[in-house]
Image (cartoon, grey):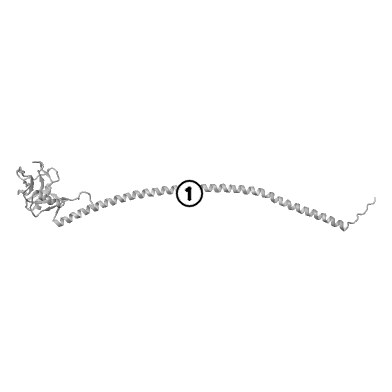
Amino acid sequence: MIRKRAEPETSEDVYTNSGFTADLKSTASNDSKDSYEDIYVNEDVPETRVTRSHKGTMTTEIHSAGIRRYRLTAVCLGLLCVFLLTAITLLWIKFNNLTAERDQLQTKRDRLQRRLSELEKVSQDLWIYFNSSIYYISTEKKSWSESREDCSERGADLLIINSREEQDFIHKMRGGQQVWIGLTDNETEGVWKWVDSSALTTEFWGTEEPNGANEHCVITGYWSDPVKNWADFPCNDQFVWICEKRLLMREGAC
């Protein structure tokens, strides 16, 4: 069998085929682009899911970190409050101690001031110091009541003798004069009391003294005996007198 030789394609057929081919290429090119776009679109799906999961994890971590910071801040504030309360308590205790010390110093200062004033009075009125008291002897004579008034104006009272040592001291101080002392039985006959209302316990009466029914006040130095020389006299008689002022020397050392 004899086959016919294929006739060569005409130019139109070539162009036609070329156009077909171009369409095919164009179609293939579009399909490829669509495929790539689909791939990119499809690839966005898992990427978005991962991102959202990551964002959720980050949000949880941030939330947890915020809670931890809040707790740490709360603990720090609590410790700071405890510290401040402790500091305030210590300062309050220290303040009270300083206040007490200040009051004690003020008390001592007032005591020293009073003592200084008394010593100034001693220097002005020729007071004499003996055993926590100071003594003043008058230069004129008055009745027992007038003598006591004078002592009161000087911030003192008539002499109270409580010991043999004090009696010896007065014996030297009076220089042989007879002087009023602060002893009387004006309230009750025969019941002798000192001007501070204390009872008579240490006595230095002279011989046969006291002996007068109307003699209610006492002088020292009436008898020649240097110790036992007290005698009772009418209170209106006039003698010199001795005032005594007790100091605050025994209220605590400075």
Q: Residues within 10 Å of mark 1 (few under 14, many from 20)?
A: few
Q: In which quarter of the image is residue 116?
A: bottom left
Q: Say which residue appears at 29% left-offset and 52% top-offset.
A: 102
| Rendered location of residue 174, percent (x, y) | 9, 52
| Rendered location of residue 12, percent (x, y) | 87, 57
Q: Say which residue appears at 40% left-offset and 49% top-offset.
A: 84
Residue furthest bottom as drawn = 11
Q: Is residue 7 left or right of residue 213?
A: right
For label 1, the SS is helix
Q: In this view, does 75 lie to the left or right of 60?
A: left
Residue 21 can be seen in this image:
yes
Q: Say which residue appears at 33% left-offset and 50% top-offset.
A: 95
Q: Say which residue appears at 52% left-offset and 48% top-offset.
A: 66
Q: How many labels does the image show?
A: 1
Residue type pointed to by label 1: Thr
Please state which of residues 10 and 69 is positioned toward the viewer in this rendering. 10
Residue 131 can be seen in this image:
no
| Rendered location of residue 201, percent (x, y) | 12, 43
| Rendered location of residue 37, percent (x, y) | 71, 52
The residue wearing badge 1 is 73
